[in-house]
Amino acid sequence: MTQTRDNKAAPRAAMAPGVPTRVLAAKVLAQVIGRGRSLKAELTHALPQLDDSRDRALLEALCFAVLRRRGAYDAALAQWMQRPLSVREDELRALLLVGFAQLDALDLPAHAALSATVEAARAMGRDRQAGMVNALLRRAQRDGIPRAPARDAFPDWLAAKVEQDWPEQADAVFSASLVAAPLWLRVNRQHGTRDSMLDRLAAAGIAAEASALGSDAICLPVPVAVSALPGFAEGALSVQDLSAQQVADALAPRTGARVLDACAAPGGKSAHLLERDPTLQLLALDIDPRRLKRISETFARTGVGAQAQVLAADATDPDNWWDGQPFDCILLDAPCSATGIIRRQPDVLLHRRATDIEALVALQARLLDACFRMLAPGGTLLYATCSILREENQFQVEDFLQRTPRAGFLPLDERFGHDSWAGRQRLPGEEGADGFFYARLLKKG
């Protein structure tokens, strides 16, 4: 009897525990590394495919670990493989990196990591390569992954900028950017005090510490799922890094002030301001209408939605939306290189290009000029970024002050980081927080 080929492959058996997580990790990383996709976007799509919160946490941990140590893992593959994998084998290559990460960076039993990763290769239709995957992972287990300086994870152009801007701190910046961040929480004052929330966390068996630098800030040295946080669903707690929380302290609007958050999505900083003072007349603006949903969800969960207005508009073009009434305070958390939050967004090291910086600096300058125009005499504009590059921060503010006769600045103290002329710069990992820049600008009467 003549055999006929069925166009549809026979269905595979159900995957063993742990295998779907490795398969998804490989697919996510193939998109991020090979196709320039956003890690956050890919995880947003992939995480709901796993039912168990432990599997979801492992998926995130695998992806972050690979991106932080990708240079060393790529070097190991180049050394150990006789023939490099082709571009078409990006998912298989990503799976090997996932295997290395389990043995090198995560506290997982080696036998389970090996078994699940080899089975993942088979589940991905790579039966012929399963033996190769097994051999390479066993060599990694036996010999270890070669260590590499943290600087090597950075593209040369970015490493050179960090060394130029922060020569004494550069090595610490490189190292801190490749270490997992703690989980920072913000207490909603409308739901109770920080001390009462610390008691609730302790009762739930969650280790937590108060921060002396943020009156609403709590640090969890060992992160937990937000679903495990008492009061999170009701808006009593939000996830927000200490550096981002300090924006409210730096801006410090007076009671009942008219406030503009010019680049507001996803809404955490606006919500923080309103949690502290529900009498603020706050407009949360963002250029991307799709991101307004995130702002509205943040406001609804934290219970501040009734006090705020949300608008999709371009802050660089006030003539198309501004009613002409000046704002007492403006928060400009400007689009930037995100070089201060690489520990949270390691794909920045893959996707950011040297040519991006010039375009970002130009956009930041337009935003500063437009926002300052909408500021009332005597009002305060807080310019903030999650960058550590001086051209986006110190030099940007210097240029603005030089071209704007009515602009001055109000100094910030050492709580906000290193002195950076008219502003303050925190570097990644300092005080356990993200890299962040703040400059408090004043419109002279």
Image (spheres, grey):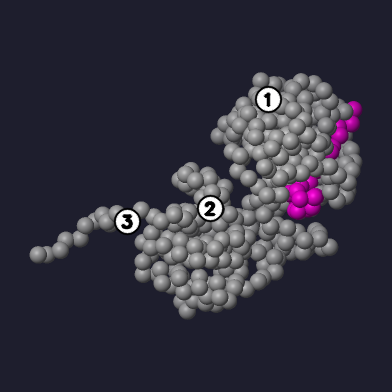
How many residues crowd mark 2 within 10 Å: few (<14), some (14–19), many (20+)? Answer: many
SS at badge 3: loop
Task: Give residue 251's mark.
Answer: none
Decide if residue 52 is on the left or right side of residue 270.
left
Q: What residue type is labelled 1?
A: Val
From the top left corner, tell me how far across and down residue 139 is, in percent.
52, 75
Residue at (62% x, 26% y) in the render: 300
How many residues crowd mark 3 within 10 Å: few (<14), some (14–19), many (20+)? Answer: few
Residue at (27% x, 56% y) in the render: 10
Q: Name the residue under label 2.
A: 59
How many residues crowd mark 1 within 10 Å: few (<14), some (14–19), many (20+)? Answer: many
Quadrant including the C terminus: top right
Q: Which of marks 3 and 1 is in front?
A: 3
Task: Give residue 12's mark.
Answer: 3
Tell me the distance, in whole angstroms, between the alpha carbons under discs 1 and 2: 33 Å
Quadrant including the N terminus: bottom left
SS at badge 2: helix
Q: Is residue 58 visible?
A: yes
SS at badge 1: loop
Q: Does the magenta stretch include residue 298?
A: no
Q: Toward the viewer: 165 or 51?
A: 51
Magenta region: which residues? 426-445
Q: Which amino acid does label 3 sit on?
A: Arg
